[in-house]
Image: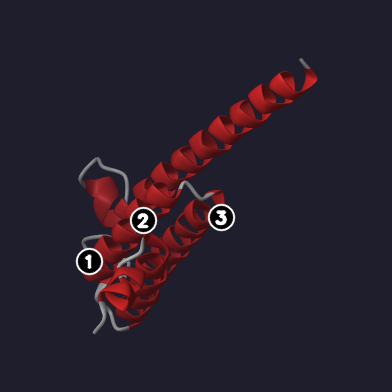
């Protein structure tokens, strides 16, 4: 494999897509824990990309996975019910909230940069 191809395969956007795809396959086959970790890895890629769209996708998928897990396996250790019994938030819900906070932060920074660029252009 060439160095260029390897670099493209390890680029955050390619890894993001791969991790989200694998997490979806894992949740479908009942491996919620591995699905969570891969979705968390996709979150890290989305942060690296500073992409509102990718962060929104993590937020949405995490919510979907939590709903699916709670519906299909309400006694699973990662279910909202099991987390509540431990006095903790469900992991997928927590990841969704973290992705939302990161998305809002990226949007705010972009808005500030646009505002600064507009001020400089008008001077």
Q: In the figure, is residue 23 to the left or right of 99?
A: left
Q: In the figure, is residue 117 to the left or right of 21?
A: right
Kindly report which numbered mark, 1 or 3, lies closer to the viewer in this rendering.
3
Question: Which callout, 2 or 3, points at the residue further toward the start of the chain?
Answer: 2
Question: Which callout, 1 or 3, points at the residue further toward the start of the chain?
Answer: 1
Q: Using the rendered view, name the quadrant where residue 10 is placed.
A: bottom left
Question: Which callout, 1 or 2, points at the residue further toward the start of the chain?
Answer: 1
Q: Secondary structure at mark 2?
A: helix
Q: Colour mode?
A: secondary structure
Residue placed under numbered mark 1 in the picture = 33
Label of residue 2 in the image = none
In space, the residues marked 1 and 3 are separated at their CA atoms by 24 Å
Residue placed under numbered mark 2 in the picture = 45
Farthest-out residue, top: 123
Residue placed under numbered mark 3 in the picture = 53
Q: Secondary structure at mark 3?
A: helix
Percent x, y of residue 119 = 72, 19
- Crowdedness near tag 1: few (<14), some (14–19) or many (≥20) residues, C-alpha within 10 Å: some
Pick the residue in front: 70 or 33: 33
């Amino acid at each position: 494999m060439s160095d260029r191809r390897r670099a493209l395969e390890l680029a955050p956007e390619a890894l993001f897509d791969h991790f989200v795809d694998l997490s979806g396959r894992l949740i479908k086959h009942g491996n919620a824990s591995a699905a969570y970790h891969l979705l968390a890895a996709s979150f890290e890629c989305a942060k690296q990309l500073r992409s509102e769209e990718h962060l929104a996708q993590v937020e949405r998928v995490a919510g979907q996975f939590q709903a699916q897990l709670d519906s299909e396996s309400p006694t699973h250790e990662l279910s909202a019910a099991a987390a509540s019994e431990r006095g903790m938030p469900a992991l997928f819900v927590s990841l969704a909230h973290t992705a939302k906070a990161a998305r809002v932060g990226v949007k705010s920074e972009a808005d500030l940069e646009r505002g600064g660029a507009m001020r400089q252009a008008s001077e």
